[in-house]
Image (cartoon, helix red, strand yellow):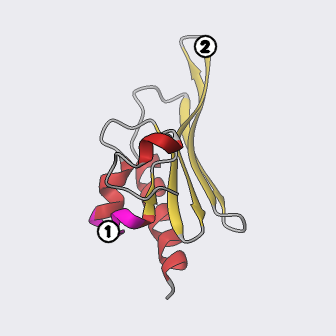
Amino acid sequence: MDKVEQYREYIQKLLTEYSNYKSLNEDVEAQTVFDKEHDHYQLVHVGWRNKRRIYGCVLHLDIKDGKIWVQHDGTEIGIVSDLEALGVSKKDIVLGFHAPYKRKFTEYALG
């Protein structure tokens, strides 16, 4: 299996695991969005809490040029540590939520 296909499987596995964490509010649903053709992957929360609409992206990852781009991470722990635990090299992870000029100060890929 090539690297990109393995990364697709890792991302889908992790987002599915994250989606299984139960919210304190049963009216908020965790949905996974997998665009396998264009390599865009998201976990979003959708529903209602205290008569207020809840809609928001929790995680957004893309695969571009053989690297995993973490576009948004709204988790407490951070999905990057989970990716590394699966064997993804830091040189294949881009912290897309950091400005390009700041990425050189991290241990991760520039882009």
The residue singled out by tag 1 in the image is 86
Q: Amino acid at mark 1?
A: Leu
Q: Is residue 15 left or right of residue 108?
A: right
Q: Mark 2, residues whose alpha carbon is within 10 Å: few (<14), some, or many (≥20)?
A: few
Range drawn in magenta: 85-91
Residue type at mark 2? Arg
Residue that label 2 marks: 52
Q: Quadrant of residue 64?
A: bottom right
Residue at left 32%, top 68%? 86
Q: Is residue 90 magenta?
A: yes
Q: In this rendered view, identify the residue nearer to me: 9 or 90.
A: 90
Residue placed most toward the observer, 56 or 111: 111
**Percent from the top left, x then y, of residue 11?**
48, 62
Vertical placement of residue 7 versus 31, above or below: below
Q: Residues within 10 Å of mark 1 (few under 14, many from 20)?
A: few
Q: Residue at x 36, y 68 (%)?
A: 88
Where residue 59 appears, as percent x and y from the top left, is 51, 44
- Residue in the image at 45% along x and 48% along y: 95
Left or right? Give the position of 98 relative to 51. Answer: left
In what element is the residue under mark 1? loop
Instruction: Describe the element under mark 2 as helix, strand or loop.
Output: strand
Residue 48: percent from left, percent from top: 59, 21
Q: Relative to residue 73, is residue 81 depicted above or below?
A: below
Q: Nearer the viewer, mark 2 or mark 1?
A: 1
Q: Measured along the vertical axis of the image, is residue 59 above or below residue 84?
A: above
